[in-house]
Amino acid sequence: MSPTDNPTSAHTFQVDLRGLVDLLSHHLYSSPRVYLRELLQNAVDAISARRALDPGAPARITVRADDELSVTDTGIGLTEQDVHTFLATIGRSSKRDADGRLDGAGLARARGDFIGQFGIGLLACFVVADEITVVTRSAATPDAPAIEWRGSSDGSYTIRTLPASAKPEPGTTVTLVPRADAAEWTRAGRVLALARDFGSLLRHDVTVVDGNGTEHRVNRTPPWAERHASPLARRDALAEYCRAAFDFTPLDTIELDLPLVGLRGVAYVLPDAAPPSRRNGHRVHLKGMLLSDQADELLPDWAFFVRCVVDTDGLRPTASREGLYADETLAAVRDALGARIRDWLTGLSASDPALLHRFLSVHHLAVKELARYDDELLRMMLPWLPFETTDGNVTLDEFARSHPAVLVTRTVEEFRQVAPIAGAAGLGVVNGGYTYDHDLVHRLPEIRPGVSVSDLDPGTVTAHLDTVDPAAELAANAFLAIAREVVGRFDCDVALRSFHPTNAPALLLDNREARHERTRAQLADEADRLWADILGSLRAEAPRAQLVLNHLNPLVRRAATVTSRELAVTAVEALYGQAVLMTRRPLKASESALLNRSFISLLDHAMLGHEAGGAGGSNGSNEAGGAA
Ligand SMILES: Nc1ncnc2c1ncn2[C@@H]1O[C@H](COP(=O)(O)OP(=O)(O)OP(=O)(O)O)[C@@H](O)[C@H]1O
């Protein structure tokens, strides 16, 4: 059989409109409410098209909400041919060039002048109504008659010519009668709220007329596009807009202006701490029409502390028109807005440090968390973040100016114990015990190359404490020997130094590595052969802990001259025990036993002394005893 015996025939796709509307309403649009946005948008586009021909043409949109809903515009209108070509052909739009392609000049034109571009918007009306009526008269072809088109959700439509008197002026009225299950979307109150939400920044007059004939103005010029009597009045007007749109009073307002994409608006700084995980919805308007109030892709993630409202001509909507299309333009806009907010932050340090501090007092934890992963933010903010230091609560920059060798503790306890003494000895210590702080302080040299940062270790502190004079050291020698013997059992050295505050008798310098090394060594001693070898091979020369006795402290001076060995041992145990307690680290069993023992001995000694004193004698008998 030859191919000609079986001829091919051409067919056209059939579209099941009900299926398409179902698809749109369940999968493309988030809610039936979008029907009003599509109607307003078509009206705006029609006015833009008419004004391109006649710049003085009227520009009014009137929404009537009664038993039925209608939207009337003074736009370009349609001829019968236009109705067949554009209105009744799904996917066809007058807002692209004749070739109708979604690229090249046609798309550029659609994006430049109009909000719509896909040719599916009108279908959104079928989400709330089974029939749409369009009465229209063309402004481009003034002698063309007025046309009435009735489209049904089953895919059929009728068209008829009307007498000129039925529509004396050019423009279009779209009317729909809601289905019973969708009536709530076309009630006057709801329509006004929707119109204000979607259309508050539309650039042509929009009015909603309710069932009583009362007119409600929908849109206004945004405060950033208005002139104000003074910068303060401008700021107030912007803040007022924030209260109305977002329901909070901003800490500050940052004006946004990117002429290349026709974008203007404001970033509002949140007055309360927001977890960075909570992404802020920004309000994005496209040629005045609200595209989304949840657009989180407009700003870089780190800018979680602002909420924006912007109106732009240059960004693309997705087909649902509820989000921004992710293209290079959006990426460039995000970078540019990020740069603007960063400029605000850095500018604040010079122009309004008080505000910067207010900002950081609210957002510093979140800023710190992000700065660990975001190098840019780290560079920008680290010098400004408040840290607890031996100079009080200061920024790292301030701190590093007086202490180019920054020391940082690993725990809050270490800081509490060492800071007063290290501070008095002229050392600069930062509390690295709070979440993120230790990591962040260590990154300071990346942005301040002259600064060094190291973890606080016992040797550094001891080296900065004043040595005592040799004669005093010699006089205390016997006591120090007993002290070394007692605390040596805890892998601890003893040193005698002079330091402030004088009411601190002793300081236990101990760091985590040293503690871990000692625990490991202890395990090695207790372990069986195999494990002892393995643990032994890991042995490192870790610094021992150090008990530094304060020669300026009267109690220590007295203890150093005690002649009774027993009392000297008790004194060392008590001093060591108290110093361990001051570190606030958990006590080992042997340390608890030592504390108990020293407490009981001291009590015993005090009572003995009391009795001896009460009997008129001395406590010399005890000093003579001596054996431990
Ligand atoms: N109020 C109106 N005045 C004049 N023409 C209109 C009006 N409403 C719709 N049209 C015509 O009908 C066409 C289809 O409208 P529809 O809303 O379906 O798509 P669109 O606005 O072109 O694109 P989109 O799907 O992106 O909204 C429009 O391109 C326009 O030519």
Image (cartoon, helix red, strand yellow):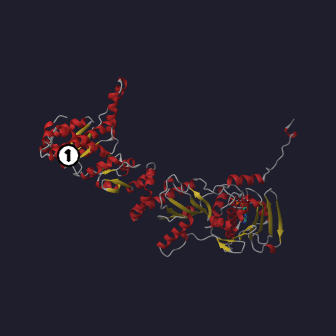
Instruction: Locate the C terminus and report the quarter of the image it occupies.
Output: top left
Q: Nearer the viewer, residue 169 or 393?
A: 393
As drawn, 44 above or below 278:
below
Q: Up-down: is 579 above or below 317?
A: above
Outermost residue on the bottom side: it is 229
Left or right of 470? Residue 425 is right
Q: Position of residue 442 (x, y in %)?
A: 36, 47
The quadrant holding residue 184 is bottom right
- Answer with the quadrant where ligand 1 appears in the image: bottom right
- The answer to whether 276 appears left or right of 453 in the picture is right
Q: Nearer the viewer, residue 433 or 166?
A: 433
Q: Nearer the viewer, residue 81 or 426?
A: 426
Q: Quadrant of the N terminus?
A: top right
> Number of marks in the image?
1
- The location of residue 147, given as percent across then percent down, is 80, 67
Residue 450 visible, this orientation: no
Question: From where the camera sits, is residue 193 visible?
Answer: yes
Q: Position of residue 237 (x, y in %)?
A: 52, 71
Q: Helix, strand or loop at disc 1?
A: strand
- Name the spot of residue 7 as percent of width and height, x first: 85, 42
Would you say the beta carbon of the disc 1 residue lies within 8 angstroms of ligand 1? no
Q: In this view of the protein, which residue sits in the foreground, 77 or 561?
A: 561
Asked if residue 406 lies left or right of residue 439, the reply is left
Q: Residue furthest top?
A: 529
Instruction: Give the residue pinned by disc 1.
Output: 497
| Residue at the spot 68% in from the left edge and 66% down from the top edge | 191
Residue that appears at 71% across and 54% down: 24
Q: Amino acid at mark 1?
A: Arg
Badge 1 local density, few (<14 within 10 Å), some, or many (20+)?
A: many
